[in-house]
Amino acid sequence: MLSTADIQAALRDCYDPAIPCNIVDLGLVREIALAPDPDAPGANIPGVPTRYSVIVAVTPTTKDEAAAAQLSAQIQNRLAGLEQVFRSEVTLIDAPAWTPQNITPAGRRLLGLDGNPSLIQISPKVIR
């Protein structure tokens, strides 16, 4: 059975176009919803594994439409690689806006921000 933890683990392979860190540790993933998809091949046939419809709500780090499109495509491509996912949808949300304070402790380590827990500024070299 597919879980939100499985989806979250898969999304760790997706990286923000502007900041070199995965979208989970950047705190961009706001919500993951999954449900059995009744339109999936073999749905409701005994013995056929359940396939799911997945919706991921993400807050982009920038307002750049090209970066948002790249982020959305990256997420959909990654989820398409999961056998249990029949269809996926990415919803880009503006509020609440993303801030560096959303970065997880693991993300702070990846970005070299873990030495000072109050440090939230990201070096301009990291952001393109």
Image: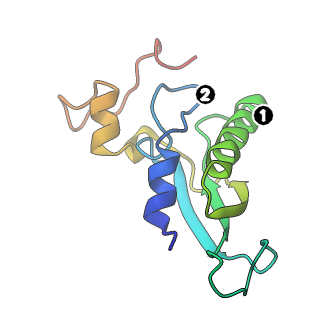
Q: Earlier in the sequence, mark 1 or mark 2?
A: 2
The image shows residue 14, relative to residue 84, as above or below, that is above
Tell me, what colour scheme is on the image?
rainbow
The image shows residue 74, relative to residue 9, as above or below, that is above
The image shows residue 54, relative to residue 58, as above or below, that is below
Give the residue drawn at x 67%, y 54%: 93
- Which quadrant, please, contains the C terminus? top right
Secondary structure of residue under mark 1: helix
Q: Residue at label 1? A: 65
Please name whichever residue, 71 or 127, is drawn nearer the observer in this view of the structure: 71
Q: Is residue 28 left or right of residue 121?
A: right
Residue 62 location (% of width, % of height): 64, 34
Residue 41 location (% of width, % of height): 79, 72
Residue 28 location (% of width, % of height): 52, 47
Give the residue drawn at x 63%, y 51%: 79
Q: Is residue 96 left or right of residue 21?
A: right
Please name whichever residue, 46 or 56, is drawn nearer the observer in this view of the structure: 46
| 1 or 2: mark nearer the eye | 2
Q: Is residue 100 left or right of residue 120?
A: right
Q: Residue at label 2? A: 17
Secondary structure of residue under mark 2: loop
Q: Is residue 124 left or right of residue 17?
A: left
Which amino acid, mark 1?
A: Glu
Give the residue drawn at x 47%, y 55%: 8
Residue furthest top in the image: 125
Query: 10 Å neighbourhood of mark 2: few (<14), some, or many (≥20)?
Result: many
Please name whichever residue, 81 or 105, is drawn nearer the observer in this view of the structure: 81
Which amino acid, mark 2?
A: Pro
Q: CA distance from mark 1 to mark 2?
A: 11 Å
Query: 10 Å neighbourhood of mark 1: few (<14), some, or many (≥20)?
Result: few
